[in-house]
Amino acid sequence: MKRDVVVTGLGAVTPLGENVSETWTSLIAGRDAEAPLELFETKGCRCHRAATAALPSLDGASPKALRRLSRASRLAIPAAREALATAGLLDSAGRSLLPVLPLSVSTTAGGMAFGEEFLRGILAQKRSGLLGTVARYLPEQQILDLQIALGFEGPSIIIANACASGANAIGHAAEMVASGMADCVLTGGFEALTELVFVGFDCLQATTTDRCRPFDLKRSGLLLGEGAAFLILETPENAQRRGAQTICRLSGYGHRTDFFHLTQPQPQGQVLVEVMRQATDSAAIAPRGIGYINAHGTATPVNDGTEAQSYRTFFEDSYDNVRISSTKAAIGHTLGAAGSIEALFAIQALITGELPPQLNLQTPIPEIAGALVTGKESRPSPLHTMSVNLGFGGSNAALIFSRNEN
Amino acid sequence: MKTNLAIIGQGAVSPGGIGAEALLRGIPAETMVPFVSRPDRTWPVFKIKLNAPALERWQKEPRLRRASPISYFLVEAADQALAGLDTQARAQTGLVVAFSTGCLAYSRRFFESIITQGQKSASPALFPETVFNSPVSHVAATLRLEGAAYALAGDETAWIAALRTAWLWLEQERVEQVLVMGAEEFDSSSLDAYRSARWLRSQTNKNRFIPSEGAAGVLVRKARPEDSVVISQLADGFIFRSKAQALTAGERCLKDFEAKLPCSLSAQNNWLGVVEQALMRDRPSCARASEPPYLGEAVTASAAWNTLRTISFLTQQQPRILFPIWGGTHQMGAMALEKITSN
């Protein structure tokens, strides 16, 4: 028997803000966080800009403790703490009220900056003082940091399905709750900018030297970003028992692998169409019920045309009803965190009715032009919103959030 | 777990050889590999020869031409575990693979070229293969597994998270069966990492620590009356950050398993072995999954190999075995394996 799943907590650290409220206000105002990248040298790259997040302060952490935390953990801990706080699961000392709290999270690079430091060290034939770097770069170390900082333990899963990971982590958490495996799950994703990943996308010529222009005919590549977002998912009964306020329902999840190519989607976008169908089927709604989509929209030449085609195919006659935008022009592509941050934006659109505008648009791709959110736009009562993500290896995922039923 | 997970297929690639049988009988050959930080010093390693015919055949697949060694280990082990499954059944098969360091050799090569030759020399052919889920994608595409597919990261206990994921997908009726795998590839930078952690202290036969590589997997489905081997209990999520905490985490993890259940011992030959000895002192041990033959240490691949070895210890006299999973960097876990005898 499948149980309903509701969202009761939200938290985020993004290049637009240190929490959900700051981020959302800036996003809706049409601001972007693109700036020269100063975290590491980019002299040999084509692209020198990214969307960097300001690290929130961690109350009570000593300078030594802060030095031991990876940048990824510095992003993840405050975002997870905010999610616990909004769900009413944080005590006055800033620790989880639940000593056992299952965790479903995503990342693609974990604490890679520590791994880079380790490799630099051994190549320089350094023979001591390296344990602190190599021991802390693996993704489970950020999970451990999170668990220790917030005071809980329990089964955890780290999904590393490239840029769809964040959606997978949330979808997986929803399935844990729906199946009865857990009553309440902390879920989300985190990613910190690192040189290896930045240079990787740069050498693929996937990053742009222009503005990031999702769904534009003149798009030339993506803007990399970083951040973290977390949600609390639970059953309505569990939320009611705790006296927690329900933000919305997580009603649908679809995911599948596109076999076409390691880094390119199948040109007709058929797999994404199937994934969206899985999601609407599991939510038991028709496509026309979806009022807004936070699209993947990387602004790479290969992705956006295919994605636009997928939406056209999926919505058929009801295409005029949906509004679409990609928020990657504002916060960058946050890779393993993208699915979580963008799911949070889909939730915010659902509960506020405000829609994030599509930034940097000059000449929209014709297949999607009419559906793009071009300026300040609101839709007072969308019943359902969707978040869509695609990743290397052909990972495709879609999540649907729905208004609470009265 | 409301439903037992039945194991209906097995596959392995290890330094002992190709196939699950080699986990019990293969004698791995040592290769002396230099440290990156000290090219004048070497350490024994169990490396898999990529020119073995079973692995070479996959290197000719167009999709796998540029793939990393871990992809060849995975696809071969997956192919063994899927033996007999037709195209229709494969379309209903999910795939979940646990990794610790994943495509480490390619990641190291990619970043080393940036450090030594500059960012302009970064290889666009190499970068996509450094991503955790690239080998998962290769396996799914090559063997046409059309169900859900996840790449998981973590220590040895990611193997338990992978099995739990399979159970979830089966409960949700997303797929008919799930191929659950663990895989690692060796890179010489691992030697420096293990040396930093002081795990490379002893080379005596009793307490050797030899880095290794390979893959293994089990094909699982919801247990049916005709199935003979099942996973009936999973436990994980008991975290630690010190040896003392590891001991108490292990105690808490094992308390839900019957005290008299025979154990399959499998801890790494480092400080975890000491923890295992302390925790298992009062429990009957059925066998040591990690010897003989000793196949070396390969994190999630070791967890998968030792699961297959533990299955071979199941007998009518010993129909249920506790198999603890000693995570090296995060948490403790365990599972119970059972042989079902039909009446």
Image: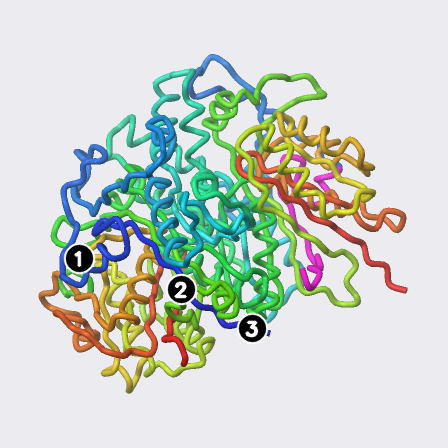
Mark 2 highlights which residue? A397
Disc 3, SS: loop
Residue drawn at x 34%, y 70% as measured from the top left: A386
Q: Are marks 1 and 3 in contact (CB under 8 Å)?
A: no
Residue at the extreme top of the image, as rendered: B40
> Alpha-carbon neighbours of circle 2 within 10 Å: few (<14), some, or many (≥20)?
many
The secondary element bearing badge 1 is classed as helix
Q: Is residue A360 magenta?
A: no
Q: Residue placed at 60% from the left, 60% from the top? A: B178
Q: Position of residue A207 (x, y in %)?
A: 21, 49
Type of residue at label 2?
A: Ala
CA distance for labels 2 and 3: 20 Å
Chain letter, disc 1 residue: A
Mark before the other along the chain sequence, 1 or 2: 1
Quick check: marks 1 and 2 in contact, CB under 8 Å?
no
Q: Read off the residue under disc 3.
A: A2
Task: Magenta stretch: give its range.
Answer: B1-24
Between B41 and A281, the one lying in front of the other is: A281
Q: Which amino acid does label 3 sit on?
A: Lys
Judged by depth in the image, the label closer to the viewer, 2 or 3, is: 3
Image side of residue A125 versus residue B250, left or right:
left
Q: Is residue B55 left or right of residue A200?
A: right
Q: Do labels 1 and 3 share a chain?
A: yes
The N terminus of chain A lies in quadrant: bottom right
The label number, if any, that marks residue A26 in the structure image: 1
